[in-house]
Amino acid sequence: MTRFLPAAVAAIPLMLAACGNDSDLRQTGPSPEIPDIKETLVPSMKIAKPVGWGDEVPTVPDGFTVNAMATGLQIPRQMLVLPNGDILVAEGRGGNAPALRPKDVIAGVIKKRGNTQVDSGDRITLLRDANNDGRPEVRTVFIDNLNAPYGLAFVDGYLYVANQDAVLRFVYQPGQTRITAAGQEVTKLPSAINHHWTKAMTASADGQTLYVGIGSNSNAGERGMAVEEERAVVWAIDRETGARRTVARGLRNPTALAIEPQTSALWAVVNERDEIGPQASPDYLTSVREGAFYGWPYSYWGKVDPRVRPQKPDMVAKAIMPDYALGSHVAALGLSFARDGGFGGPFSQGAFIGEHGSWNRKDLAGYKVVWVPFAAGQPNGQPVDFVTGFLTDGGQARGRPVGVLFDPERRILLVADDLSNTIWRIAPRAAGPARPPA
């Protein structure tokens, strides 16, 4: 493998030049157009070259403002607002899956070109903006020495952190700016290999259950199905006892979880499979139904994946369709529902979704935050661009959005940008003072 690497890297420009143009298909909404598979020796690959923001800021709709609430972070991923309004930011990078094939090495080189080069924070940072002006008066390391933290939840005086290998519980005292006591392990999480390492998490509406998303250990089963035990699933964990059960299966990489406020139902954004064509497998937003199977690795959007061995027609027949397509390879990593009327008007009911951006297609996709309108607890209409400008007109990347967080008390949207290591704050231009925290 090491002898292959120099030759592979040298061949990248030639292989990328051979990639064809993507067709123009409708790939968002409940019934996306799905083309036939186009499997090639080397998949289509392109990553936006990082250039930084300079004096620029993201583009937001008329009537909104945007500012950098925090910079210089160490790979910000997901966020949480505490009852007193303090904002927590999970920072870090995980995973340790070795490359299996030459094209894995090539893809790794391409992906790395589009990522930040700072060290993994392995920590949680606290931001306190008591007067809601977008300029925190306090910024401190809240918890450090974590293991690639990602999902966050707060219930009844306890902070829950989903590291890449376990869920931890921390006792929280209102107003404190640092926790030094070790967290108590609630339950271990699958972490061997960790091809997809992020562990998304949210609490149920009643606070009793922690839902955790666990991604697959491969793209489409190429490491063998033995390593996929309790992968590509969502767990329900009793937050007090640590007892867990599997809610749903076949979700290749559920990267963010959230509770829909009208119905209290669990929803997820999921990254679908790669290497079968630039528009063959849309990422999606879906409700997570008890006992459901969503297809991975045997099928996607009702189509069979011929690469998987052995084939299982019975599992293909069992698979249900996701609720809403977001587009192929947009890499949705953030999900947050508007609450208590949201921003009002067209942004009253729906979901904000952070799209980190593609690597497995020639024309770049994602690299933005979109709004999906809802009605009666279900998606209702096409997605609307809400935060853009992460790509320059020349196709270079100023930033890449990950987690998104709508705060109904302060009527703001927060966006974690893990390329520029920034938290962006979006607010209505004529926003009044924040309501008192709950």
Image (spheres, rainbow, N blue to C red):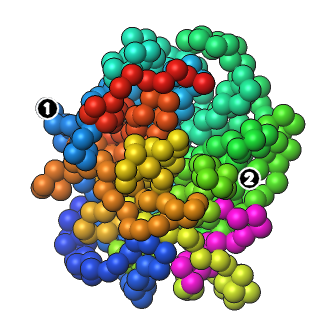
**Total number of numbered discs in the rendering:** 2
**x and y, in percent, of residue 314 in the image:** 74, 86
Would you place residue 338 above or below residue 70 in this image? below
Residue 434 belongs to magenta span: no
Residue that mark 2 sits on: 235
- Of labels 2 and 1, earlier in sequence is 1
Kindly identify the residue that appears in the image at 56 percent across and 19 percent down. Answer: 84
Which quadrant would the N terminus be assigned to in this image? bottom left
Q: Residue 414 vs residue 178: left or right?
A: left
- Cα–Cα gap, marks 2 and 1: 43 Å
Q: Secondary structure at mark 2?
A: strand
Residue 300 belongs to magenta span: yes
Q: Residue 438 vs residue 285: left or right?
A: right
Start-end of magenta stretch? 288-302
Q: Say which amino acid is labelled 1.
A: Asp
Q: Say which amino acid is labelled 2.
A: Trp
User: Which numbered circle lies on residue 55?
Assistant: 1
Kindly identify the residue that appears in the image at 60 percent across and 35 percent down. Answer: 152
Q: Secondary structure at mark 1?
A: loop
**x and y, in percent, of residue 251 in the image:** 62, 65
- Examine the rendering and report whether any part of residue 166 can be seen: no
Q: Residue 71 vs residue 172: left or right?
A: left
Would you place residue 236 above or below residue 182 in this image? below
